[in-house]
Image (tube, helix red, strand yellow):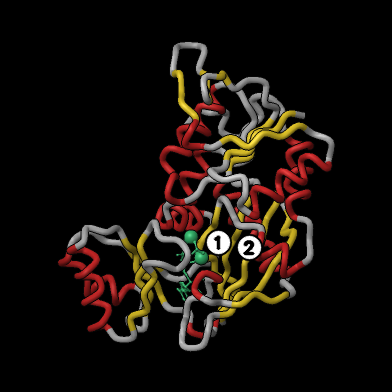
């Protein structure tokens, strides 16, 4: 097969591992810098160009799209879909997952457990919204944040109102969420490939911090998932339409609660803490599923 990996930098751990896995399984690989692609949007013959060359003949595209290039990355993936290429992460699924609010709305429809969440535009509703999610302590988060940035814990209703007012003033999109105290600063990252959780790690926040992100000093450890946790992670990935997903779950008194579904999950933390060759599992999935025009959404988005 000829497999293209959309990635800004071939030295990134996840990109390197995917390249290794593709090659070791006997395929041809090419790392394509997402931002250097340009598109010819022509009736009946859409094309992607790269340094003066038309990109053709790819059996599959594996997108690794960083949060800062979501919009352009989406249009590149969509262009490949228009050309009939198989994309492991489809543009529609990526678009859903990059908006926390949209993701939670989709998950709620399918009955996936989640922290009680609220969203509003008008300042008139701030107090009511706080009441809706059960009052302080509560979490306020930017809908497009990553690595724990823009996630704030408000311990009192007064603090919550101040933060909400500040975010409003900045014209930032945010949601507010019930704080799951019993999770104790830990969450579980479930790596889903196809219809299986292939690896999981528990991340625990640094002392004095409630965010478990590794970028915020959190530490990772092995963990054993319950069948309910596995089923929840797979269902969440499926709701988003993602073949590969990093599903973050909080362990609560009422069972697993999905916090978010990541569409370009990093492989370093999870491969190192579990010792599993996840890159190869991803490539194996591509081998089985990549057929022309075989994406779920068929580029209709
Ligand atoms: N409702 C909540 N209750 C308890 N802890 C929470 C809640 N929401 C978030 N956290 C903690 O804060 C961390 C960051 O939140 P979240 O994952 O929503 O943000 P993010 O910026 O998108 O991070 P990521 O880099 O994983 O995409 C979580 O990993 C979790 O430890
Ligand atoms: Mg996120
Ligand atoms: Mg997270």
Q: Position of residue 75 (x, y in %)?
A: 45, 33
Q: Is mark 2 within 8 Å of ligand 3?
A: no
Give the mark, 2 or 1, whose residue is nearer the N terminus: 1
Element under disc 1: loop
Decide: is 185 above or below 93: below
Residue lying furthest top in this view? 44
Q: Is residue 147 left or right of residue 2?
A: left
Q: Is residue 16 left or right of residue 299?
A: right
Q: Position of residue 6 (x, y in %)?
A: 58, 38
The residue tagged 2 is 232
In the rendered image, the quadrant that contains the N terminus is top right
Whether residues under marks 2 and 1 lie with C-beta atoms below 8 angstroms apart, the answer is yes
Q: Residue at x 46, y 44 (%)?
A: 95
Q: Residue at x 52, y 24 (%)?
A: 51
On the question of residue 259 being in view, the answer is no
Q: Nearer the viewer, residue 187 or 205?
A: 205
Q: Residue at x 68, y 55 (%)?
A: 192
Q: Position of residue 227 (x, y in %)?
A: 73, 68
Quadrant of the rendered image containing residue 155: bottom left
Q: Which mark is residue 242?
A: none
The residue tagged 1 is 112
Quadrant of the rendered image containing residue 255: bottom right
Q: Residue at x 26, y 61 (%)?
A: 120
On the question of residue 94 being in view, the answer is yes
Q: What crowding class fits label 1: few (fewer than 14 Cα within 10 Å), some (14-19), or many (20 or more)? A: some
Decide: is 250 above or below 96: below
């Amino acid at each position: 097969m000829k497999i293209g990996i959309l990635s800004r930098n071939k030295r990134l751990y996840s990109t390197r591992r995917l390249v290794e896995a593709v090659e070791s399984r006997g395929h041809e690989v090419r790392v394509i810098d997402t931002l250097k692609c340009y598109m010819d949007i022509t009736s009946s013959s859409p094309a992607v160009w790269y340094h003066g060359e038309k990109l053709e003949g790819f059996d599959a595209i594996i997108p690794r799209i960083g949060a800062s290039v979501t919009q352009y990355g989406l249009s590149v993936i969509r262009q490949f879909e228009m050309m009939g290429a198989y994309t492991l992460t489809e543009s529609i699924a990526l678009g859903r997952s990059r908006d926390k609010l949209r993701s939670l709305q989709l998950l709620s429809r399918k009955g996936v457990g989640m922290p009680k969440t609220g969203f509003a535009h008008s300042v008139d509703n701030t107090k009511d919204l706080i009441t809706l999610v059960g009052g302080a302590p509560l979490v306020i988060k930017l809908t497009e944040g990553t690595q724990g940035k823009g996630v704030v814990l408000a311990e009192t209703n007064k603090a919550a109102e101040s933060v909400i007012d500040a975010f409003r003033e900045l014209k930032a999109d945010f949601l507010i969420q019930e704080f799951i105290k019993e999770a104790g600063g830990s969450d579980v990252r479930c790596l889903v490939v196809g219809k299986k959780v292939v690896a999981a790690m528990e991340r625990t926040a640094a002392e004095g911090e409630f965010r478990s992100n590794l970028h915020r000093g959190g530490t990772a450890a092995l963990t054993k998932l319950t069948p309910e946790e596995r089923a929840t992670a797979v269902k969440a990935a499926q709701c988003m339409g993602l073949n590969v997903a990093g599903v973050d779950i909080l362990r609560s008194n009422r069972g697993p609660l999905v916090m978010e579904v990541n569409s370009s999950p990093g492989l370093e933390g999870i491969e190192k803490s579990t010792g599993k060759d996840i890159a190869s599992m991803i490539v194996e999935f591509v081998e089985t599923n990549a057929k022309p025009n075989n994406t779920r959404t068929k580029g209709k988005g």
